[in-house]
Image: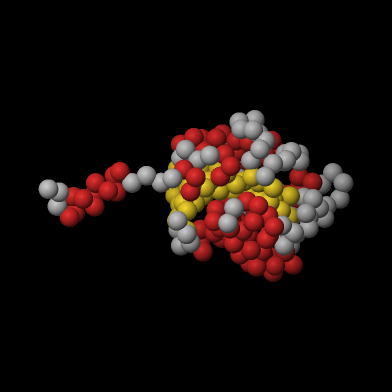
Amino acid sequence: MLSFFARILTNKKTEKIDPMKKFLIVGLGNIGPKYEETRHNIGFKVLDQLAREQDVIFETAKLGDKAEFRFKGRTFILIKPSTFMNLSGKAVNYWLQKEKIPQENLLVVTDDLNLPFGTLRIKTKGSDGGHNGLKDIQSYITAKYNRFRFGISDKFSKGNQIDYVLGEWDNEEMKQMPERLKKAAEAIRSFGTAGITNTMNEFNGK
């Protein structure tokens, strides 16, 4: 007869997480201090906020930094790819396969020039909208995946788009940022617990 502690160890080894209760949240950005506070790195910033709220830390893993937490019976796996923005697809595809997460449980967090600063928009599919990170992801998986767009507005003159997205937040944006990040983290938890439709209804345009 197994001892009490032996039974615990055995149960831990055999315990399996239902794939439908696992969620892959990928924040897009570029690695390194140079890019840390740039608009293009809002995906990283949102995931950092969520990790702080859940009291978990990112650790270096294959093709990115990884953190994980459980919330209301769901497992959330957070990935910040280390491949740089334009090669994000490799990391997304790898972690979907490794963690055996169904594609409908993937949420990609990215910046969006077409939305006012801080506006949230979650969609179940769509085009890459000229975003190189999304374009690369769609070269690995189908275009039908959930994406979470965080508005960075389009306050740049003609020909200065690259400088704008790789530029840092202005003072007014920085003042509003904490509340916007909290709302974004709330939306991600809702995605895993309340479902994509309820989350879109609750948070889109907020």
Counting from the top left corner in percent of width and height, residue 18 is at 44, 45
Observer-nearest of 112 and 75: 75
Counting from the top left corner in percent of width and height, residue 141 is at 61, 32
Counting from the top left corner in percent of width and height, residue 98 is at 46, 36
Observer-nearest of 18 and 63: 18
The residue furthest right is 158
* Left or right of 143 on screen, residue 12: left
The quadrant of the picture occupied by the C terminus is bottom right
Q: Residue visible at 45% across and 56% down?
A: 73
Instruction: Note whether 129 is above or below 203 in the view shown.
Output: above
Q: Residue visible at 69% across and 41% down?
A: 125
Observer-nearest of 24 and 153: 24
Task: For residue 174, say whether it is visible.
Answer: yes
Q: Residue visible at 24% across and 46% down?
A: 10
Counting from the top left corner in percent of width and height, residue 62 is at 46, 39
Instruction: Note whether 206 is above or below 161 in the view shown.
Output: below
Q: Residue visible at 15% across and 49% down?
A: 2
The residue furthest top is 139
Task: For residue 58, say whether it is visible.
Answer: no
Q: Number of numbered discs present?
A: 0
Query: How is this picture coloured?
Result: secondary structure
Observer-nearest of 104 and 162: 104
* Left or right of 120 on screen, residue 68: left
- Asked where in the image residue 116 lies, by quadrant, the reply is bottom right
